[in-house]
Image: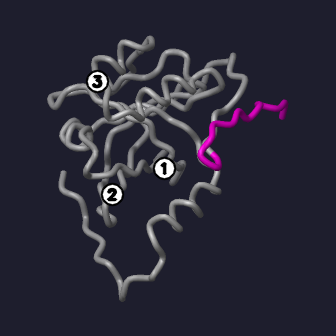
Amino acid sequence: MQPDVMAPVGEASGVTDDLFRHAMSRLGAPVTIVTTSGPAGRQGLTVSAITSVSDAPPTVLVCLNRDNRSHAAFIRNGVVGISLLSRGHEGIAGLFASSRRTPDEKFASADWRTDVTGAPLLADALVTLDCTIALIHAASTHDVLFCTVEAVHVPPTGETGLTWFNRQFHALPLLPA
């Protein structure tokens, strides 16, 4: 699947990379492990650029840097496993964020399961989404993967959500509805 291309509009904004990164550090985001498996092999990384798009059909988007070594595997495999992390997962989030670790080292650090697509899903995740890639949109240095959710698993024992804010992990409690 080839990405659609978004061309830059107008002149450069004058916003520096450092200023933009600093501003975005103040945007709280979920911490997820995003994985794939298939003909291009098993890969995974930590991602906070993820959000829901629609519930009909259930769709999420995930942003991946095209320079990331796992990018090609996601595109070729066409499947994405998304594991939302909770308190206690900070170590695995750091491991999957590391470019110095091999996929085998990353996946050996935890228990995994699969669902419909065969993408690895963290066994004790707060929530897992098993997805197929429906559309790829190129935007600057990243591809935005629009993923159709094929299966969802929400364990009854989840206690906290893990977020990334101001370059630190923060646990958010699940309060009674």
In the rendered image, which quarter is residue 163 located in?
top right
For the rendered model, the colour scheme is one colour
The residue carrying pointer 2 sits among few (fewer than 14), some (14 to 19) or many (20 or more) residues within 10 Å by Cα, namely some
Question: With respect to residue 61, does 30 lie above or below?
Answer: above
Camera-nearest residue between 110 and 154: 110
Q: Residue at x 35, y 18 (%)?
A: 107
Instruction: Look at label 2 and name its amino acid.
Output: His
Label 1: which secondary element: loop
CA distance for labels 3 and 1: 21 Å
Label 3: which secondary element: helix
Instruction: Look at label 3 and name its amino acid.
Output: Pro
Q: Where does label 1 land, which residue?
A: 49
Question: With respect to residue 112, does 83 lie above or below?
Answer: below
Instruction: Mark 1 or mark 2: name the one nearer the start of the chain.
Output: 1
Q: Are marks 1 and 2 in contact (CB under 8 Å)?
A: yes
CA distance for labels 2 and 3: 21 Å
Left or right of residue 140: residue 173: right
CA distance for labels 1 and 2: 11 Å
Give the residue furthest to the right.
176
Residue stretch rendered in magenta on the structure: 165-177
Left or right of residue 16: residue 119: left
Q: Quadrant of the C terminus?
A: top right
Give the residue furthest to the left.
39
Question: With respect to residue 117, does 19 lie above or below?
Answer: below
